[in-house]
Image: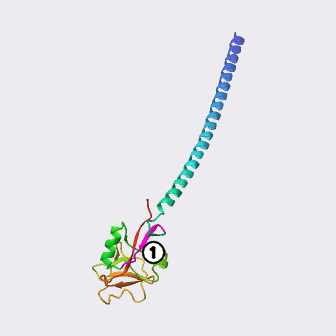
Amino acid sequence: MNKEVSHLRNHENALIKDDLNDLKNRTDDQQRMVLEDVKAFKKDLENVKQNFLQDIKAINKTLENICRTCPSGWKPIGLFCYYFSTDDLSWDNARDECIRKGAALAFLKNKEEADGLKSYIEQGRYWIGLRRDEEPQKWKWVDGSMLSYSNWHDGEPNNIHVEHCAESKSGKWNDLTCESKLKYACKKWCCC
């Protein structure tokens, strides 16, 4: 009887071992299939990402071409469109005229912007959007920001004749009475 029990146990153990091997093989197969699916998904996802990035670049290029177009009579410089008047106005009237054009008197926040305008305003005198605030030494741009970058002529601003407005004269800045009549430069975003 012991032989029969032993034989049955061996047979049961062999069946259990076969079942475990079969289960292990099926698990390994399923794991391989899942890993292959994950690899395929990652590859598909990378392709979608690359296509998306290419589409974004194409859209940006199109928008850049469309949005970099300035209205007739305006000059594209950097990210902005500039209008350089041929008529002479006081600073306040020049500011108002720029507003009517959907722009502002040119505010130049850094050297790159000032340098970009040089070739257009080197030979003339143009109002820019800079005005002395209530306190004598506080200069503000028309957008409300305080002056941080400046490009004053030597000895300027000097406020000799109660000069509260700024002009660009041969590419450098000068303070001048706001009632003086000068050409003016307007600035607005190049945008759709």
Label 1 SS: loop
Instruction: Tell me where residue 50 appears, x and y as whole percent.
Output: 58, 49
The number of discs equals 1
- The amino acid marked with disc number 1 is Asn
In the current view of this chain or complex, which residue is farthest to the top? 1
Q: Residue at x 38, y 84 (%)?
A: 174
Question: Which portion, as a residue range, is magenta?
Answer: 78-87
**Drawn side of residue 8 relative to residue 97, left or right:** right
**Drawn side of residue 118 relative to residue 91, left or right:** right
Quarter of the picture containing the N terminus is top right
Instruction: Tell me where residue 123 appears, x and y as whole percent.
Output: 46, 83
Taking 129 as reference, is 69 above or below it? above
Question: Which image quadrant is residue 179 in?
Answer: bottom left
Q: Residue at x 31, y 72 (%)?
A: 96
Instruction: Tell me where residue 186 appears, x and y as whole percent.
Output: 39, 72
**Drawn side of residue 36 relative to residue 128, left or right:** right
Residue behind mark 1:
110
Taking 156 as reference, is 22 above or below it? above
Taking 118 as reference, is 36 above or below it? above
Is 85 contained in the magenta span? yes
Instruction: Tell me where residue 177 appears, x and y as whole percent.
Output: 31, 84
Is 34 contained in the magenta span? no
